[in-house]
Image (cartoon, rainbow, N blue to C red):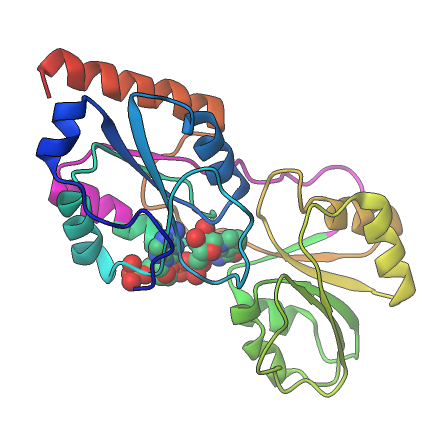
Amino acid sequence: MDSQRGDAAVSGDTRSASGMKRILILGGTTEARLIAERLSDRADLAVTLSLAGRTAAPAALPVPVRIGGFGGPAGLAAALTAQAIDVLIDATHPYAARISANAVAAAALAEVPLIALDRPAWQPVAGDRWIEVPDIPAAVAALGETPRRAFLALGRQELAPFAAAPAHFYLIRSVDPVEPAPALPNAVFLTGRGPFDEARERELLAQHRIDIVVAKNSGGTATYGKIAAARRRGVPVVMVRRPAAPRTALAGVDEVMARLDHELASAAARGV
Ligand code: NAP
C-alpha cells in the first residue's frame, strides 16, 4: 500500500488520552470529500480519508489521505483495529460494490460502527429512452449489429468488453488517459473531470454525432448533464444497473453527519 500522509497507526491509548475519536472515510466520491470538509475542523475528531488510488491526481482533500487497497476484508479490519478507528464511513461510489462489501465484513470483524452512504439513483423522466442492462457485457450487446456512434461515459477499467464490438464508433471520456488504449479501431478519447453541464454535453453529443450513450446510474448532479442532453436530443441511453448494495445506506451528507453524531453520543454514553 502506498501512503500519502496520515497513515501511521495511532494507538487507542493516545487517542483516548486526547479524547479524540478517529474516523475513517472510504472515499473516491464528491460526498466523501464533502464529509471530510464538514469534519475537518472538528477538534474532537481525527479524520482520515482512504482512496483506492485509481486517479493519478485526486482532488485536494482537507484531511489526511491514505491511498491503496487494504487487502480485502481482513486487511481492512486489521487497519481499523491498528488505527483504533471509532467509526467507519463508507462513502464510496454506488458501483464500488467490493469495497462496500469489505466494509460491512470488516466493521463486523473489528466491531466498529459502520455508516454507509449511497447517493440516490436517477429515475427516468418523460422523454428519456433508457435501455436498462445488468452489466457492461449486456451494454455491449445492447448496441446491436448496426454501427452506432456511442458515447461511453464509463470508467477506464470498464472499456475492454467493447473490443468485442469494433464496428461502432466510440467517444470515450475519462479523468486520466486510457493507457493502454483498448483495441477499438474507431474511437476518440477525451480527458475531463466533472461536473459536466447539460449545455456542454449537448454540444459534445452534436459534435460527434452521438446516437447512443452508455452510462452508469451514478446519481447526483455532477454527471447528470449527459443524461439530460441525451433526452433533449432524443438519444437512447444504455443504463447499466447498479450492483446490489450489501447494506442499507443513507442518502445524503447531512444524514451521515446526524448519524455520526448519534454514534459518537451513544459511544460516550457507554463510556467508550
Ligand atoms: P471496488 O471494485 O469496490 O473495489 C476494488 C478494490 O479496490 C477493493 O477491494 C479495495 O481493495 C480497493 N478499494 C476500493 N475503494 C477503496 C478505497 N476508498 N480505499 C481503499 N481501497 C479501496 O471499487 P472500484 O469500483 O474499483 O472503485 C474504486 C474507487 O473509485 C472507490 O474509491 C470508488 O468510490 C471510486 N469510484 C468508483 C466509481 C465506479 O463507477 N466504480 C466511480 C467513481 C468513483 P482491497 O480489497 O485490497 O482493500
Q: Residue 3 lies in what quarter of the image?
A: bottom left
Residue located at (20% from left, 41% from top): 107
Residue located at (81% from left, 48% from top): 229
The answer to whether residue 18 is above or below residue 87 is above
The answer to which of 105 and 162 lies nearer the viewer is 105
Q: Is residue 58 left or right of residue 209?
A: left
Ligand 1 quadrant in view: bottom left
Q: Residue furthest top?
A: 269
Quarter holding the N terminus is bottom left
Residue 126 percent location from the top left of the image = 77, 37
Q: Is residue 228 left or right of residue 95?
A: right
Residue 9 percent location from the top left of the image = 19, 47
Asked whether the viewer can see residue 128, the reply is no
Residue located at (79% from left, 74% from top): 148
The answer to which of 4 and 52 lies nearer the viewer is 4
Residue located at (58% from left, 73% from top): 159
Asked whether the viewer can see residue 11, the reply is yes
Q: Which residues are magenta?
A: 103-129
The answer to whether residue 111 is above or below residue 252 is below
Whether residue 105 appears in magenta in the rendering, the answer is yes
Residue 68 percent location from the top left of the image = 35, 60
Quarter holding the C terminus is top left
The answer to which of 7 and 123 lies nearer the viewer is 7
Q: Residue 210 lies in what quarter of the image?
A: bottom right
Residue 15 percent location from the top left of the image = 16, 30
Callout count: 0
